[in-house]
Image (cartoon, rainbow, N blue to C red):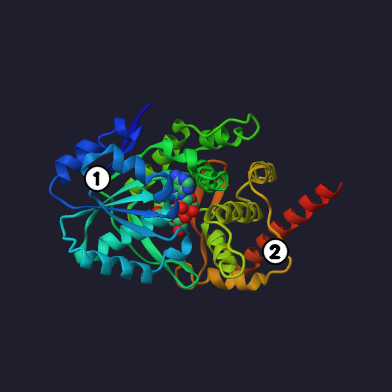
């Protein structure tokens, strides 16, 4: 099975890598370029060998190995990469292949886009989250302190190759990280996708290439209409306003993953949608049921909820000091630029905590 999507300036192929146009694309466009492959510790171990032993043109590639995890998404690490490229005498027509999850594609895409005013880069995502989200859409960037993606650029990759075989070695927790973004895709614009994904747990079935293709089509379709996030693209931020604040809040003492933070953000922002009478109680209950059957609730009882709210004040999506959020107006429908108040945010965090207390009570019974 193989699928192709056209984005603004590049093509996304979803198939076995060996059945894709990867080899031809590289030979046509980069025959005389030096190849740089960026990996992290895990993709170095699980994914790199396949790539360099399958493709002769990659056997002499320069390998840039970065530590795994969000701590690598910093400007200091990019500076080390740029120093290395300078030592290697990397030139403007050389090409970078980002082989990894969202960390590798964010760091690699950003480092490539800035170096000598821009090297070409290609994404080969190896996590579910990167396959359905981070590898497409042209956003690259790094964090600044506890503020996520504070420094970055919109730059398209030259091509994206999605091969779900890479998921075989991915830990299950990482599958759930990507799954949160897929559920979000359904909730914001496609009720059928939400429905298809929401029954997977009940019927004990796995995510398929078709599910990945549908999610990618949703993301790509939105990005095509609004590449620089002037309007429609903001829909993709559903779950991320509160999600990012939770991720930032916990980042220092007890980090939670991006996908889990988004899942919690989806719950909190659905609650605000309900409080504003945009969705019904039965819709909220359905979202609650699906999210909690896939993700644990979180204990916020010892947290300073106001600290989480303060983080939201620095969100890039804010305008004129107002916290703007995407809210649901039904399952499969959403609305952008909704102002949310401090009280609504705090109530939604209390709601998350209440869900946790209720789950704990059920466990004790
Ligand atoms: N640019 C964008 O549009 C965009 C969109 C969404 C998320 N992001 C960013 O993506 C990042 C998260 O990405 P992620 O969830 O892919 O995390 P990640 O890149 O850290 O990967 C998760 C873990 O899986 C490991 N891994 C990757 N591929 C593997 C494989 N095939 N087998 C075994 N282990 C493997 C990694 O080493 C890491 O430990 C966040 O920083 C987020 O902000 C960016």
In the rendered image, residue 87, in percent from the top left (x then y), is placed at 22, 67
In-image side of 116 versus 68 (left or right)? left
Q: Is residue 330 above or below residue 355?
A: above
Sequence-wise, the earlier of marks 2 and 1 is 1
Considering the numbered disc 1 on the image, is that residue within a helix, a strand or a loop? helix
Residue at the limit of the structure toward the left, as seen here: 32
Q: For mark 1, what is the residue?
A: 58
Q: Residues within 10 Å of mark 1 (few under 14, many from 20)?
A: some
Separation of disc 2 and disc 1 at Cα? 48 Å
Viewer-proximal residue among 154 and 158 = 158
Q: Residues within 10 Å of mark 2 (few under 14, many from 20)?
A: some
Mark 2 or 1: the one toward you: 1
Q: Is residue 328 above or below residue 342?
A: above
- Residue drawn at x 28%, y 52% as measured from the top left: 156
Considering the numbered disc 2 on the image, is that residue within a helix, a strand or a loop? loop
- Residue drawn at x 56%, y 36% as measured from the top left: 197
Viewer-proximal residue among 106 and 332 = 106
Q: For mark 2, what is the residue?
A: 300
In-image side of 158 versus 312 (left or right)? left
Residue 239 appears in view: yes
Which picture quadrant has residue 304? Answer: bottom right
Residue 6 appears in view: no
Q: Dots 2 and 1: beta carbons under 8 Å?
A: no
Viewer-proximal residue among 283 and 117 = 117
Residue at the limit of the structure toward the top, as seen here: 1
């Amino acid at each position: 099975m193989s699928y192709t999507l056209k984005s603004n300036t590049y093509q996304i192929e979803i198939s076995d890598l060996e059945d894709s146009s990867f080899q031809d694309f590289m030979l046509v466009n980069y025959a005389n370029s030096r190849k740089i492959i960026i990996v992290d510790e895990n993709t170095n171990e699980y994914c790199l060998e396949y790539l360099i032993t399958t493709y002769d043109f990659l056997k002499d590639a320069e390998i840039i190995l970065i530590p795994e995890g969000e701590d690598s998404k910093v400007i200091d690490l990019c500076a080390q990469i740029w120093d290395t490229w300078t030592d290697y005498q990397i030139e403007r027509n050389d090409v970078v292949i980002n082989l990894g999850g969202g960390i590798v594609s964010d760091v690699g895409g950003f480092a490539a886009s800035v170096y000598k005013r821009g090297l070409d880069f290609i994404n080969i995502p190896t996590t579910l989250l990167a396959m359905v989200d981070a590898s497409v859409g042209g956003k690259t960037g790094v964090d600044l302190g506890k503020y996520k993606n504070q420094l970055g650029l919109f730059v398209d990759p030259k091509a994206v190759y999605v091969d779900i075989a890479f998921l075989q070695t991915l830990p299950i927790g990482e599958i759930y990280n990507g799954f949160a973004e897929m559920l979000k895709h359904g909730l914001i614009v496609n009720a059928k996708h939400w429905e298809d994904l929401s029954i997977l747990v009940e019927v004990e079935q796995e995510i398929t290439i078709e599910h990945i293709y549908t999610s990618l089509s949703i993301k790509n379709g939105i990005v095509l209409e609004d590449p620089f996030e002037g309007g429609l693209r903001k829909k993709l931020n559903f779950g991320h306003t509160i999600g990012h604040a939770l991720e930032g809040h916990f980042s220092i003492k007890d980090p939670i993953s991006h996908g889990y933070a988004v899942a919690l953000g989806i719950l909190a922002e659905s609650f605000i949608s309900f409080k504003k009478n945009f969705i019904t109680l039965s819709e909220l209950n359905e979202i609650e049921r699906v999210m909690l059957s896939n993700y644990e609730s979180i204990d916020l009882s010892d947290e300073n909820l106001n600290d989480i709210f303060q983080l939201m004040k620095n969100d890039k999506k804010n305008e004129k000091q107002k916290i703007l959020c995407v809210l649901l107006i039904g399952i499969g429908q959403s609305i952008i630029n909704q102002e949310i108040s401090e009280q609504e945010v705090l109530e939604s965090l209390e709601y998350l905590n209440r869900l946790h207390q209720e789950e704990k009570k059920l466990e004790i019974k």
